[in-house]
Amino acid sequence: MNFKGVVQFTVFLMASFPVTGFITFKFSFFFLLILSTINFFRTKEQTSKLTLAIVLSYFIIDLLSSIVVLNTIESSEILIRKSMFFLLPLAVYFVSNHMDKKTINRILLIFIFSTATLSLFVLINLFLMDFSELWNKNSFYHPVFRNNYFDLTKIYFPYLGLYFAFSFVATIHFIIWFTKEWYIKLFILAMATFIFVFPMLLFSPRAAFLALVFGLVFYISRMKKAVVIIALLSLIFIMVIPNPLKERFEKIANTERTLPSQEQAPHEVNYRYGVYHCVFQALKAKFPFGYGIGNVQHQLDECYSFYSYNSFNSFVEQHYNSHNQFLHEILKNGLFGLISICLLFYISFVRANLIHQTFLIMLIIALLTENFFEREAGIIFFTFFNSIFLFRTQKTAI
């Protein structure tokens, strides 16, 4: 196997992380770092240096922030976790001459099949447990399906949902571009709906489902293909029929916008409202500079301590984060943090092809309700695919 083959095999192994796990991903990544170092000395010219600098600046802002904060232990832990925002784009950049069209397509296919394997593994287990009984037992405050999905995958729901959502969109991408016969297209679409969308109804990741809908709408606006329209109509129909995901959306609509108090029962508490109240209180106190990396959660917890509510999912016990990555960046690094993440998405979007742009749209929607860039599962997913798409060989774009 030549050098290019070794690079591609390593990246393929990384793309299988939904099944092989994050430990395998990290070992493969460190090997990719070695390969990228070798390729750095073999390749005389590198393009897109400004793009690389802008992408890396998102992590560099955090690094500079860590120098001035007092919470060195927590800030160091965060920097280690978020180092993928620096190291992975750098590694991919220096082997980008081996990231051709065929390689990108294979990466997507490996990810799709890995996510599908994980999904089928869980579905088989659920049917072996007596699916109808689980369906009857499941409720908002007794989320049987959510518990089973986490126990079997060890991946937190918003991240697992985003993996499934992107796999569904990527499958449609292949149906449109690489499948000719209409009956095969419909068969693959039906299978993808069962494997990726149906599980999302069960473990109910609201942010991921919204990302899926907005991603498909964006794809339609650019492609106007019948397959995508059919998929979107199917999702709308799914939301009409009774299912656990619909129940979770209804819970948002029916919960009053009042701050948590001891007079409220758990089902009456609007947790998001309580979180965002403290987020904006913290923002007003330290705008436009922020609290520095590692200090944000302490400020939010201090605000939560004034809530008298102290029952199921207590704010003091759960330590809720800001549930919005863009607000978190302002809390952490002020306007510099917001500018850095906006530049990261801007430079990625303007250089992107359709599937990459759809990926970015889906991430932006997800970031509006979750702090995806604060957990390993979100960091690896974004940095891997954004780097692969962004630093591909431009003349062979998908």
Image: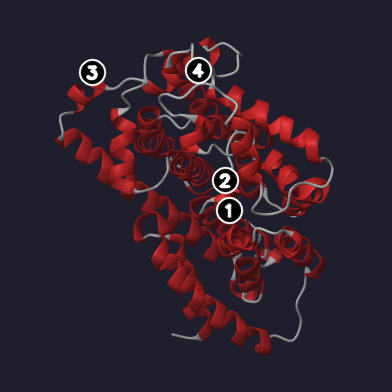
- The reply to whether discs 4 and 3 touch (Cβ–Cβ < 8 Å) is no
- Taking the image as drawn, is residue 224 in sight? no
**Between discs 3 and 1, the one toward the N terminus:** 3
Q: Secondary structure at mark 2?
A: helix
* Earlier residue among tags 4 and 3: 3
In this rendering, would 236 be left or right of 321? left
Image x and y of residue 118, in percent: 32, 48
**C-alpha span from label 4 to label 3:** 25 Å
The residue that appears at 61% across and 44% down in the rendered structure is: 297
Report the Cα–Cα distance between label 4 and label 1: 32 Å
Residue linked to disc 3: 136
Residue 370 in which image quadrant: top right
- Mark 4 highlights which residue? 269
Give the Cα separation between the discs numbered 2 and 1.
9 Å
Q: Residues within 10 Å of mark 4 (few under 14, many from 20)?
A: many
In this image, 61 relative to 119: left or right?
right
Tag 2: amino acid: Phe
Residue 395 locus on image (x, y percent): 70, 65
Quarter of the image with the N terminus is bottom left
Residue type at mark 1: give it. Answer: Phe
On the image, the x and y values in percent for residue 9 come to: 45, 73
> Closer to us: mark 4 or mark 2?
4
Secondary structure under the numbered disc 4 in the rendered image: loop
In this rendering, the answer to whether 15 lies above or below 130 is below
Q: Badge 1 is on which residue? A: 382
The residue at which mark 2 appears reads as 372
Indicate which disc, 4 or 2, sits on the residue closer to the N terminus. 4
User: Residue 66 falls in which quadrant of the image?
Assistant: bottom right
